[in-house]
Amino acid sequence: MIEKTLKGKPAYWIWLAILGSLIAIGWACYFRQYAYGLGLTGMSRDVSWGLYISQFTFLVGVAAGGLMLVLPYYIHNYKVFGRITILGEFLAIAALVMCLMFIMADLGQPLRGLNVLFFPTPHSMLFWDMCVLWGYLLLNLLCGWVILTAERKQVPPPKWIYFFVYLSLPFAVSIHTVTAMLYCGLPGRHFWLSAIIAPRFLASAFAAGPSLILIACAVMKKFANFDVGEEAVKKLTTIIMYAVIINTFFFLLEFFVGYYSEVPGHMHALEYLFFGLEHHGEVYNNLVPFMWTATLFNFAGLGILAYMKISKMFDFRLVTVAAVLIFLALWADKGLGFVFAGFVPNPLEEVTEYVPTLNELGITIGVWATGFFLLTLLYKIALGVEHEVEE
Amino acid sequence: MYNKGLIVSGLVIFVLLVTFPIWFNGLDAGPLPKPELPPGGEKECVAPAAEMRDSHMQLLNEWRDDVLRNSDRVTITVGGKEYQKGLQIACMQCHSNKEKFCDTCHEYAAVSPTCWDCHITPTELVKKEAQ
Amino acid sequence: MDNKRRKFLKMAGATVLAGISAPALVKLSSTSAVASGEGGHEAPAASPGNAGGHGEEQPSGVRLGMVIDMRNFYQDQGLLDKAIAACVKAHNVPQIPDPKSEIKWIWKTGFGNLFPEHSQKLRSEKIKNSQFPALCNHCDNPSCVKACPTKATFVVEKNGIVAMDFHRCIGCRFCMAACPYGARSFNWQDPRPFIKEYNADFPTRMRGVVEKCNFCGERLALGLEPACVEACKGTGAIVFGDLNDSHSEIRKVLDQEFTIQRKPSAGTMPSVFYIV
């Protein structure tokens, strides 16, 4: 089926070429960083995790979001999702590859990365993160490939694959729960030390993943003659709406806990994110514009989807706009706000802000481009099979 | 065979590329390395030369785990001489010229251990003092 | 695909898999013996025996700790500089001017930074204007050890020191996120250009690994005191010893004086005490 990636319209090749050049820039930046050290990034002694880990955190959620396509079809027999579960599985693969690349980019000694395997440490959540991430990646590769092959041959998938499909469901929940556990078990970081981190992660994941799939469906409808159908899109928007509402509710609860109790540990990080943190005469607020834009996008996207439901109208372009807004909002929430604010203020109540360097941005964009490159290839295969079968 | 010309020529180029290290230097690996013995004239090491040549890395790893992970810094006595367990504080006391001893064999075998990124060599000490 | 070709590919794939996994299996089954030997040392450290907390002692063995008597440092802030300089020299700690990349094993900071859980309201001039030493607390229940995925940082069972194995650290910086005291530093670049003078008895570190105070394990092995303690010799400014030994000097000091610790609510059970 891989041969399906070798033939395509000019738009396909131009897209891959653009991504390819971004990947090349990313590699060049990485070689510079490998030679000098992580000092080429904007990270510091106080903000010791930056864009790489925050993008990793967000993308684990996107990967878990594929669950929202697989679950209705395989457990609840919702036949309408039959053609798009493969999109969820392939998105999970691309997102997980990006996650692993971001981790490698972030390691101070990447050549020692295998030490996590040689010296397994069950009391470390990073060890379990490695286990579930790889497990979910292999599960998706296996299930996606086998089922797509069966589809191509127009035979029902082999019975044994269903064991792995069902296994991938708790794995999807586990990858994002374990990633949340990286943060919510650290006694020194009050912004993260909350039981609601894992549920919030899952809620925003189940909105972000399907949103990206909707955007991909819109692109494929325009360029690849692939229409998933109005009913599937409508069901996805319902799922996204509920997930966004729940995530917003959880976020507002965090606001309540911080601002009603006025306990500094629970309040200061939110203050830094939304209003700027005043400290020793200086105001630290470089994330404030991002967070308010994200809030605006969040409610605007939700509003668009709600409007369409209430007025019972459907317009795929509006759906796409809403999906883009929601995806960006959730990206800013997890991929910027969550990780960076955990380090502000630092354990000694000092403030160091984090601003990524150009080199760091180059690597980040390079990894995202790699993920999209892989996603394009995988979706090309999936669509190729769909078109082949339709004849 | 389909595309015989393309495949055979491709295979030939592949074999040439893969065996490049063997034929590029005229089937000669170059002169054997001659590591210079310690300038201080010491003749005995913690183990016989043949054994050290074979397994000095294993020994160093054992020492590393003993000292760092088991807090076992007990000195070892070989041939009446006491040695601490460490590259910088034992081995390099005698083998004080890394370039003329360690590097000769490592370069020949194309091995680049990262030990000296951290463990200071006598040459480094001199360089720093000059600054 | 043609059936014969398919059979060939299946056989080839199986052979390659067997060929790769055979030596791997042999290596794994032999190293597991080594690993379990190591595990025997590490497992007690990881066990939740310490998590009982609430001021219980580690029942046996040496538990090294430190009492920092600020009364000496109030009068003589230069003494604190001497202690810090001794540590820097003994361990080849690089002095990096950019505060973002700086590496600190023991350093000076204000009362409000060291003890944010205490009230800062209407503090005395002496407290407000003095600098206090901050360092790794070598906790009994360290969250950094819990976090490390490779056991590169671990509790030394013999004496309670939270040690670093720089050879194993992969530089993931999870321990830095986990430490409630900000005690850890990362080598964002090669530190050697920033080291003023080398101590020939101690290595430097390389870029990409995390480092912190190590309670001078290498000096203790030679019967010496930690560098910072020795720099304050005779003043009693820093008292170092076995917290489990009820007859030790440090226990006498703890018996007679009121001490506070950093962030006791974190549950990490630090081994460093302050008399303020």
Image: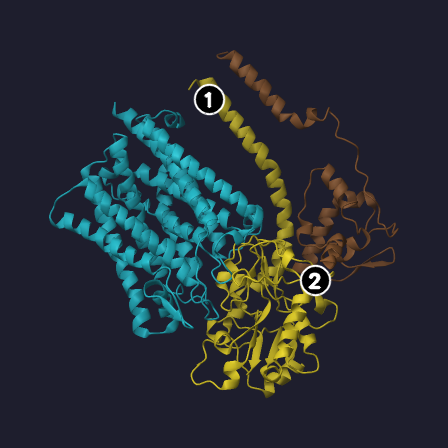
Label placed on residue B64: none
User: Percent x, y for residue A359?
Assistant: 48, 48
Depicted A19 relative to depicted C276: above or below: above
Q: Badge 1: how crowded within 10 Å, few (<14), some, or many (20+)?
A: few
Which residue is nearer to you in this view: C23 or C99? C99
Label placed on residue C197: 2
Residue A74 visible in rendering? no
Residue in the picture at 49% in, 68% down: C180
Which residue is nearer to you in this view: A148 or A252? A252
**Chain drawn yellow in the picture:** C
Q: How many labels were placed on the picture? A: 2
Quadrant in the picture for the N terminus of chain A = top left
The three-letter code of the residue at mark 2 reads: Glu
Q: Which residue is mark 1?
A: C6
The secondary structure type at the circle numbered 1 is helix
User: Percent x, y for residue A109?
Assistant: 57, 50
Q: Badge 2: how crowded within 10 Å, few (<14), some, or many (20+)?
A: some
How is the model colour-coded?
A: by chain
Depicted C71 relative to depicted A232: above or below: below
The secondary structure type at the circle numbered 2 is loop
Question: Is C55 left or right of B108, judged from the image as shown?
Answer: left
Question: Is A120 left or right of A330, judged from the image as shown?
Answer: right
Residue in the picture at 46% in, 64% down: A352
**Chain drawn brown in the picture:** B
Depicted C29 relative to depicted B18: above or below: below
Chain A image colour: cyan
The three-letter code of the residue at mark 1 reads: Arg
User: Percent x, y for residue A40?
Assistant: 52, 51
* Chain designation of label 1: C
CA separation in Å, label 1 and label 2 = 66 Å
